[in-house]
Amino acid sequence: MSEHQGADRSTQPGLSRLGLRDFRNYAELQLKLDGRHVVLFGPNGAGKTNILEAVSFLSAGKGLRGADSGEAARHGASGGWGISADVLRGGVRQRLFMALEGAETGRFRKVVKLDGHPASHGDFADLVRVIWLTPAMDRVFGGSAGDRRRFFDRLVLAQFPAHGAAASIYERSMRERNAVLEPERRDEGWLEALEGRMADAGAAMAEFRCRAAVRLQAAIDLRVGAEFPKADVQLIGEWEGLIARGDPRHRVEEGIRQALRSSRVRDAAAGRTLRGVHRTDWKVIHRPTGAPAEECSTGQQKALLIGLILANARSLFEGDFGPDPLLLIDEGAAHLDSHRRAALYDELAALGGQAWLTGTDRELFDAFGTRAQRFLVSEGTVREI
C-alpha cells in the first residue's frame, strides 16, 4: 500500500467540495473531493478553466482571468452566480460561500458568508491562499514592466493578503489624484489627503513586496532538482530599494508623500503619476546560464515560471503564517516533456496541500498515478473517472 493510499484523506487540507451555480458555462455543479490533487481533462472549451477560475475567486482579487463579477455569470441565466466550497484546515471543516445576487431588482451585490454567517472576502484569507499559473503568464518575461509587476504581486498576495487591500487603496487614490490634478478640478486640500493615502498604502506595498521577495528567494535556493531551474529575483523600485536597505516604513511613507507633492506640476502635464510603487519592476535571472529570463528560450521560460510558482508555494508551506495554498496550473503539463511532467507531479506530491491541473488528454497525467483524483470535463458537465 502506498503512503497516499494509507493516509486518512478526510483529514487532508484543501477543498473537500466545490459547488457552482450559474457560473460561466455551469448551470449547476457539485464536485466531491477526497483530498488528493485534482485533475480536470477534456477538450478545449469544455469548461476546465472555468472551474479553476471559480476556485481562484475564493482568494483576494478578481481571480485568474482578472474578470469583473458580472462577467462570470452564465449566459442566459439571471445574471447572478454562486460559489460554495468546503475547506478543511486543522481537521475542522468550514463552508465558504460567495455569490452575486440581486436578479430580482437588477441591482447586483456581492454576498460573502462563512459557515452561514455574513463575512467579508478578507475573512477567507485565513482559510484559503491560491496561487495560479495560466497560459497567459507564459509571456510575462517578455512583456511590460506592468506585466511582470502584476505577476509578482500575485505571489505577494498569496503570502500577505493585506497587500491586495493596500494596492486597491493606492490605485483608487491615484486615479482620483490624477483627476484632481486637472486645472479645473484642482483642490490642494483634497490632493494632500489623496497623497497621504497613496503614501501609506504605497509604503505598505513596498514592504510586503520586499518581505515576499526575500522569502521567495530563500525557497528557490532550497529547492532541489534541475528540471525546473533556480532563479535569482530582484525588485527594481525606488521605494522597495529604501525598504531593502533598512529604512523604516514611516520614512518611506514620508518620502512617497513628498515625492508626490513635488511632482504635481509634472504629473498634471503628463496626465498621470510618474513616481510611485506602481512603477516598480521585477527581474528574473536564469541561474544556470546567468541570462535574463526575457532572453531565455520559450521552454526555459516555462520551466522558470513553474519553478517560481513551486518555490512560492513552498515558502507558504514552510512559513507559519497562513493556510496551505491551493495551486492552480492551467494547461501547464501539455508543454512539458514526459520527464518534466513526472518531476512536476512528484514535486507536487512532496509539497502536500492540493493542486488543481487541467489538460486536454488524460494521458498527460498518467505519472500522477493514484495521487490525483481525475474528472472528465465535457460541455459543462463533469464526471469523475
Image (tube, grey):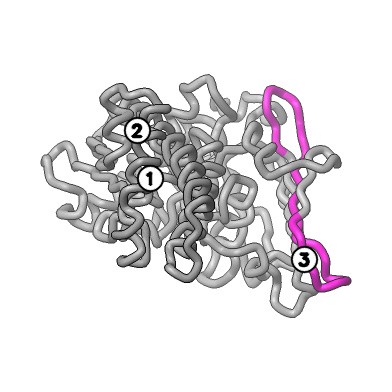
Q: Earlier in the sequence, mark 1 or mark 2?
A: 1
Return the residue at label 3.
Answer: 108
Q: CA distance from mark 1 to mark 2?
A: 9 Å
- The three-letter code of the residue at mark 2 reads Ala
- The three-letter code of the residue at mark 3 reads Phe
10 Å crowding of disc 2: few (<14), some (14-19), many (20+): many
* Residue 171 pos. (x, y %): 48, 53
- Kindly state the secondary structure of the residue where label 3 is placed: loop
Residue furthest to the bottom in view is 76
Q: Earlier in the sequence, mark 3 or mark 1?
A: 3
Residue at 69% in and 43% down:
33
Q: Report the disc number at residue 152.
A: 1
* Residue 199 pos. (x, y %): 44, 40
Q: Main secondary structure of the magenta part?
A: strand
| Residue 113 in the image: above or below residue 297 | above
* Residue 208 pos. (x, y %): 43, 33
Q: Report the disc number at residue 207.
A: none
10 Å crowding of disc 3: few (<14), some (14-19), many (20+): some
Residue at 16% in and 47% down:
292
Residue at 48% in and 47% down:
192
Q: Are marks 1 and 2 in contact (CB under 8 Å)?
A: yes
Nearest the viewer among 200 and 47 is 200
Nearest the viewer among 255 and 204 is 255
Can you see residue 55? Answer: yes
Q: Report the disc number at residue 213.
A: 2
Instruction: Give the residues drawn in magenta, as a range.
Output: 87-110
- The three-letter code of the residue at mark 1 reads Phe
Residue at 69% in and 69% down:
73
